Amino acid sequence: MIAIGRFKIESGNKLVYRVRHSKNVDIKISLNNILLNIKNWDQTNQGFKYKRTDTNFNKSLEINKKLVEFSQYIHEQIFSPKTKNLKLTSKWMREKYYDFFDLHDHNLQNCINDEPYFRDYFEHYINCNKKIEGQAKNGKNLGKNTVKGYKTMINYWSLFMNYCNLTDIKISDINFKIFDEFVHYQESEAKLGANSIDTNINKFKAILNHAKSKSLILHNDYMIGLFKFSGSVTNEVYLNDEEIDSVCNLNIPPEKQYLENNRKWFIIQLYTGLRVSDLFELSLDKFKNGFIETSTIKTKTEVVIPIFKQVQNVLDLNQGNLPTATNDVKYNKNIKEICKLAGINEIVKGSKVIVVGKGKNKKNRKIEGEYHKYELVSSHTSRRSMLTNLVKKSIPLSDLTAISGHSSVKTLENYIKSTKFEKANSVKEKLAALNVY
């Protein structure tokens, strides 16, 4: 069977090359070095289409020719005698892609010597900093999930470039106007929430900071600190002690018994503050002398958590065992229903994931509004609740880092969610105890 290679646009902003050969080979790679507006891609003719009067006309001719040559090159490599006993994978094709376009690391290194384009420097930044399997822990290493977050950001940057009818911009030309338009694009066109935009902007600036550390030329607007984003403050809910008690004391009705196992996990999470990824990795051998000793998956940090009586009660009622393993998707859905049954239905401000758009344009977006509190509960609510409630009991933040696994008090402070009324009431109570109020 002759190999069939086709170029196509995927995920709205990536030019990919896909090869199908025999029954066992179906591989594809992204061609990240092609910098032309994908709106000008002609799928039928397998090339970029520009008018003769367009600025990029000659460049499109060169790239189209290069794409034809690349496709022919891959076919030749597949049918080469040297390939006969090789397993053809995406990794193999990516190596051929690097060879053909001469994109090896030394070339990526060279790109930083000559006012690179943002996407080029993005690739360089990731290659310089991503964690290699087996590599010793280093605070500068970018783990898999972090790299995934950076790729999300660069996808929005690429969509923004297409929206502006641009291919890319040199990092030295990224001024406040471009930055502000990038933020506005995410708000108005991509319909992202404040937290998502903030995450993207932090990663965007991390790349520029890296370029700055390498003494590259950056626009003066960035150097004087104009690149700031201040989104609306999101109202992330937490459960107070009374609401947590209502969950602990809840009698699940017979027709809802499928919720009982998740209720047990929910109680454990409310009194350990573990992320859901760490929660379901708990085992009894981690329960030692009145403490839970474990290592977090996200940050590889050792944490020591006191075993609260509510957690011990769950174990005792479960014949000394942990609840049955479950998955986080089902868990997140069920704890909302558990909170509803527990009467946690106050109307509060917050953001809820809602499907917007139709058909191919359908997306999940966080929408600000007023909702029943149980609708806003997620697995992370447990972590936020425990830490907030312990702070309200005057436990020092510096001590809480040993339980939460946060690297600093400043990072931990982001989790503490108390209303202005609760803070004012706390001050009032303390003043009353001192006979001042």
Image (tube, rainbow, N blue to C red):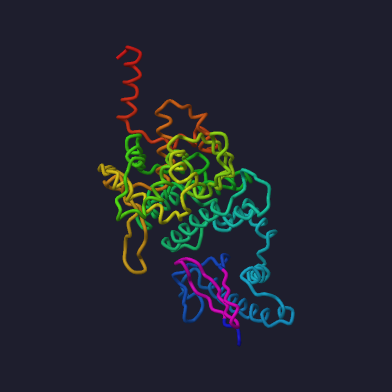
Relative placement, left or right, of 333 versus 405 is left
The residue depicted at 40 percent of the width and 54 percent of the height is: 186
Relative placement, left or right, of 398 versus 82 is left
Residue lying at the far bottom in this picture: please name it.
1
377 inside magenta stretch: no
Q: Which residues are magenta?
A: 5-29
Q: How many marks?
A: 0
Q: Position of residue 148 (x, y in %)?
A: 53, 56
Q: Is residue 291 above or below residue 264?
A: above
Q: Position of residue 360 (x, y in %)?
A: 37, 69
Q: Quadrant of the C terminus?
A: top left
Relative placement, left or right, of 256 versus 223 is left
Q: Position of residue 365 (x, y in %)?
A: 36, 55
> Residue 413 appears in which quarter of the rendering?
top left
Give the camera-side residue of 384 and 314. 314
The residue depicted at 60 percent of the width and 83 percent of the height is: 22
Q: Quadrant of the N terminus?
A: bottom right
Give the camera-side residue of 268 and 384. 268
